Image (tube, helix red, strand yellow):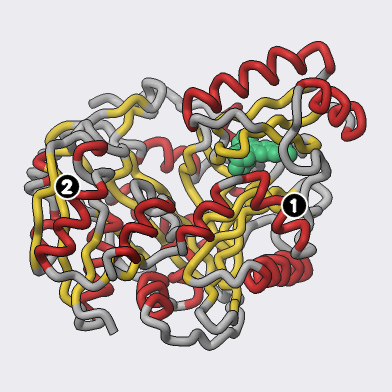
Amino acid sequence: MFKKILIANRGEIALRIIRTCKEMGIQTVAVYSTADADSLHVKFADEAVCIGPPSSSESYLKIPHIIAAAEITNADAIHPGYGFLSENAKFSKICSDHGIKFIGASPEMISKMGDKATAKETMKAAGVPCVPGSEGILKDFNDCKKTAKIVGYPVMLKATAGGGGRGMRAVWSEEELLPAWEGARQESKAAFGNDDMYMEKLIEEPRHIEIQIVGDSSGKACHLSERDCSIQRRHQKLTEEVPSPFMTDELRSKMGEAAVKAAQFIKYEGAGTVEFLVDKHRNFFFMEMNTRIQVEHPITEQVIDFDLIREQILVAAGVPISGKNYLPNLHSIECRINAEDPFNGFRPSPGKITTLHAPGGHGVRLDTHVYAGYTIPPNYDSMIAKLITTAQTREEAINKMKRALDEFVIEGVKTTIPFHRALMDHPDYLKGEYTTKFMESFEMGVPEEE
Ligand code: MV4
C-alpha cells in the first residue's frame, strides 16, 4: 500500500482525497498556488508544497513543479482529482516514468477515451449501443454531406478532440451544414489543435444518465448504478441525483450491463464513468467515457455506502475488487453551490466570505473547503461547495435539500443557493420530468431584499 500520496488538485476534492487517505493511514502532500496559501487542503495535509503563482498554467497544470513536489516529499503516488491534469495522458506517462503511481487511467486509456470518435468505435466493437452516424472521422465536407443524407437531419457534428459540448454543432438542414462544418472545425482547431469531426443522428431532448464503473488489474469490472446529470447550464452540471427519476429496473440493468461490458472490453482499471444519452423512448446510446473521479461521485457513495476515493487507491495499489454490482436503495441529490450570481447570468462572484453557517443533520453531507474568513480567489472554477442530501425516497431527499438550503448561510459573496432553492420548488423538477433542455426555460424570480 502507498505510504504517501500527493494530491495534485485544490478545493473540495483535495480535501475529499486527504480525508480518505487519513482514514487509510496514508501520509498526504498538498500542492498549492500562492492564491491558495490559506486553503483548507493545505492545512489538513501532512505536508504542503507551493508550486507556483495563482495562474493554473503556472501551478496546478505545471507538470515539472508537481513532479518535483512529489520527488522532494518522496510521495509514491499522485491522485489528480478531477479537472486539471486528471485526464492528461502526458502527465500519467511522466508519473509512471518517474516511478510514481498515477491514481487514474494509463496514458493509453486516457488517449483512447479522450479521442471521442475512437472511444465510440471502441464501444461499437464492444457491442455497446451507439448513436447511428459516421464510421469514425469524416474525411472532408463531401463525406460530411453524404453522411448527413444517409443519417438524415437533424444531425450533430462533434469534434473528436472535444467533449463536454465543445466543438459541437446541431444541424437541422443541408443549408446549415457548411457553416456548421467550418465553424465547428475552426473552434476545435483553436481549442484543441485538432479539427477532426464525426457525425451522429441528433437525439432530441435527451437525458444525460451516466453509469459509475470500477475495474481492476485482473480485468474484473462492476457498476455502481447511475447518476442523472441532465440539469446543466452551458454544459456545466448544476445538480445531480440517483436514482434517475426516468430509470426503470429494466433500463438500469441494460445500461449497467452495457457499461460493465465496455469496461471489460477495454480492460479498464480504476474508477470511471460511462455517459449515455437516453431518449424519450428509453433508448440509450454511448456518449463519452470519463477516466477520472467525477465531481458528483458523492451521491453514488451515499446510496450504496461506499468510498469511491478509497476504491481508487486500492485498485491503484493492485487490490482486486469484489466485482459485484451495486443497486441504489436510497435516494441522493447533490446541489453544486457556486460563487456566482444567479440573478445576473450566473456571473462569478469571488471575494471574502464574511459569514458562513453550514447545514447539517441526518442525511445532510456538505463537501466544501470554504470557511468564514476565507477569500475565494478569482483564478479557478467557481464551485465552492457540494450540498448532498440522502433519504429513503426522492420526496424526502428534496424536502431535506430545501431545509438544508434554507439553513445554508454564506455572506460576502453571491452564491447559487437561491437558484437551487427555486429549483426545489419547480413543478417539472418535483415531478422528475426534466431533460437536458430544462435550463433553457428556467427563469429566476426577483432577488429577495438584502
Ligand atoms: C448529443 C446530443 C444530442 N444528440 N449527441 C453535449 C456534450 C457532450 N456530452 C455531448 N452532448 C450532446 N450530445 C447527439 N447525437 C445532445 C448533447 C447535449 C447534452 C448532452 C448531455 C448533457 C447536456 C447536454 C446539453 C446540450 C447538448
**In what element is the residue under mark 1?**
strand
Question: In which image quadrant can residue 410 be found?
Answer: top left
Q: Amino acid at mark 2?
A: Leu
Task: Answer yes or no: disc 1 within 8 Å of ligand 1.
Answer: yes
Q: Quadrant of the N terminus?
A: bottom left
The answer to whether 46 appears left or right of 233 in the picture is: left
Nearer-the-camera pick, 43 or 300: 43
Q: Which residue is mark 1?
A: 285
Task: Answer yes or no: disc 2 within 8 Å of ligand 1.
Answer: no
Question: In which image quadrant can residue 343 be found?
Answer: top left
Label 2 Cα neighbours within 10 Å, binned few <14 / some 14-19 / many ≥20: some
Question: In which image quadrant can residue 329 be found?
Answer: bottom right
Image depth: mark 1 or mark 2 in front: 1
- Residue at 38 percent across and 58 percent down: it is 92
Q: Is residue 264 above or below residue 107?
A: below
Q: How many numbered markers are drawn?
A: 2
- Whether residue 357 appears in this view of the structure is no
Q: Amino acid at mark 1?
A: Phe
The answer to whether 346 appears left or right of 29 in the picture is: right
User: Residue 77's mark?
Assistant: none
Q: Quadrant of the C terminus?
A: top left
The answer to whether 224 appears left or right of 39 in the picture is: right
- Residue at 43 percent across and 60 percent down: it is 293
Q: Who comes first in sequence, dot 1 or dot 2?
A: 1
How far from the left and from the top, in percent, is residue 97? Answer: 32, 64
User: Residue 356's mark?
Assistant: 2
**Mark 1 and mark 2: Cα distance apart in space:** 43 Å
Nearer-the-camera pick, 339 or 316: 316
How far from the left and from the top, in percent, is residue 437? Answer: 64, 34
How far from the left and from the top, in percent, is residue 325? Answer: 61, 80
How far from the left and from the top, in percent, is residue 132? Answer: 83, 44
